[in-house]
Image (tube, helix red, strand yellow):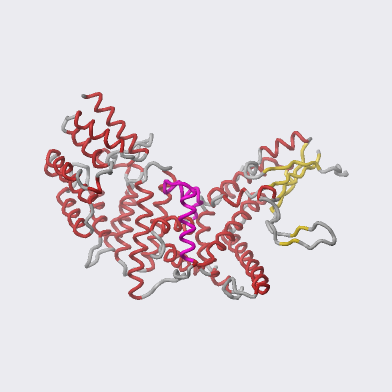
Amino acid sequence: MQEFLLILKGDGMNHLSPDELQNIMSEYRSWVNQLGEKYLGGQRLEDKGALLKSKTDEIITDGPFLEPKEIIAGYFLIQAKDQHEANQIAISSPHLGLYQIEVRAISFPKMK
Amino acid sequence: MVTNTEQIIDNLFRKEYGKLIASLTRFFGPANIQLAEDIVQETLIAACENWGAAGIPENPTGWLIQVAKRKAINELKRKKVIERHNKKEVLSSKPANEIGSVLLEGEIADNLLRMIFTCCHPAISPKSQVALTLKTLCGFGVKEVAKALLTTESTINKRLYRAKSEIRKGKVVFDIPSGKELMQRLDSVNLTLYLLFNEGYNSSSGEMVIQKEMCLEAIRLTRLLCKQFEDHKKSYALLSLMYFHAARFEARIDDRGTIILFEDQDRAKWDKDLINLGMQFLQKSMDDLPSSFHIEAGIAAEHCLAKNFKETDWQSIYRQYQLLEELKPNPIIKLNLAIIQSKIEGYQTSLKELENLSNNESLINYHLLPATQGIFHMKLGDYESALICLERAKKLNPSGSEYKFIDSKIEECKRNS
């Protein structure tokens, strides 16, 4: 098993209605339950924060600094057999469509 | 799978949305409705992510209130920094600890009422009032408001924008008026809620679920008014009227979305509980000076109480429509009078009356006039005249289910002529 970070980009949920959000919540709940042990965690990020480009540059705070579709909205940490299975898991996520999902393997395998 | 213990009530997000917006708007002031909306949106997104991953908390409403509160306080701190920086007041300088008292359970009704008076303020155009009410009080998204009101999202956005800029101009106070002003303002709130209900009830081409939800929301808000202002009998009459109509909601449309004529409706499908509620509130509404709502509720009651279509007391209904016409003269009521005449004096007399009305300027493009003429001609077996009328009605932009209905009648005429 390998760990993967699913990085969610975009502002898809900002435009959903309360009813739509509640539906996504239920679907998300089912998705997590179906994944079982393969789901390790996840968090949403605030839109606002800081962007540091070098030690000397002025700190840009309060964002968002990027185009809405580029904003990192949150991440999931999952485990999967390989990239293919990780991709399949991302495809089955109710978040795909609202957000783009980047599926990236964590490069060091977990030490047993 | 979501287990049963994790189920939360349908539309919980939507129901809490309206309450939270009302509370936060009270805190930040009506000029900052947009800010309140942003905070509540973020709160619901947080709930979506958090509950989705970790399960639904024991007290979902309390969770939402806590998160909204924290976000509001953060926003206040952030704005304070900006204000200090720009040396100007952006937000009302309310102390952050007041947010707690605004969000108290006991304040919810008060917050919602203030919000109703704000959304239905006469400085805002009626169309914008309805859109704003659906968006802020009922928790509909822009897409859903557009669907409910059968228009485009950009139209709705424009209406919302206009409403909010009226509010920002400062004429609209987030308050419940008192004394003489209260009665006047209640009248205009009633009108908006009546409009809201009718939009849901009559625009039969939309999605049934959304239309019905809109009617139920209108009922919910009217109930809130009745509870608070017991002396305002018109609100009771309006509520009674809404219940009578809502009772027939499902019986009006068949499985394929085609309209079922009143006389053909299956009365067993009328909701008896809602009819009873209608009767209850009609009794409570009794007043020395009956309003148009009183009369309309009276007419609806007459229909709901009749055992069947034939045994309806048409004389009484005709008299009530006459009263209504005196109270608010309007060609649609004339049309109704002509239709009821058919039950008393027959289709022939009624058709003459309808023919006279067809010259009325405001009815020239009203599809239900030729549609009615068509139906009456069919009743008399005159399929040729019926066909002409129905074809005319079809060209006058009937709504989806009306179109289907007219089309089916046209087919029937063709088969018979």
> Quarter-wise, where is residue B290 in the image?
bottom left
Q: Main secondary structure of the magenta part?
A: helix
> Quarter-wise, where is residue B394 in the image?
top left
Residue B315: give x, y in percent of width and height.
14, 50
Q: Is residue B150 magenta?
A: yes
The residue located at (49%, 69%) in the rendering is B107
Residue B400: give x, y in percent of width and height.
37, 38
The residue located at (26%, 35%) in the rendering is B392
Q: Is residue B24 magenta?
A: no
Label tally: 0
Residue A92: give x, y in percent of width and height.
66, 38
Residue B415 appears left or right of A12: left
> Quarter-wise, where is residue B32 in the image?
bottom right
Residue B179 versus residue B293 in the image, above or below: below
Residue B401 versus residue A18 in the image, above or below: above
Residue B1 appears left or right of B157: right
Residue B344 versus residue B406 in the image, above or below: below
Residue range of the region highlighted in magenta in the rendering:
B139-167
Return the residue found at the far right: A111
For the C terminus of chain B, the image quarter is: top left
Residue B169: give x, y in percent of width and height.
48, 68
For the N terminus of chain B, the image quarter is: top right
The residue located at (28%, 27%) in the rendering is B411
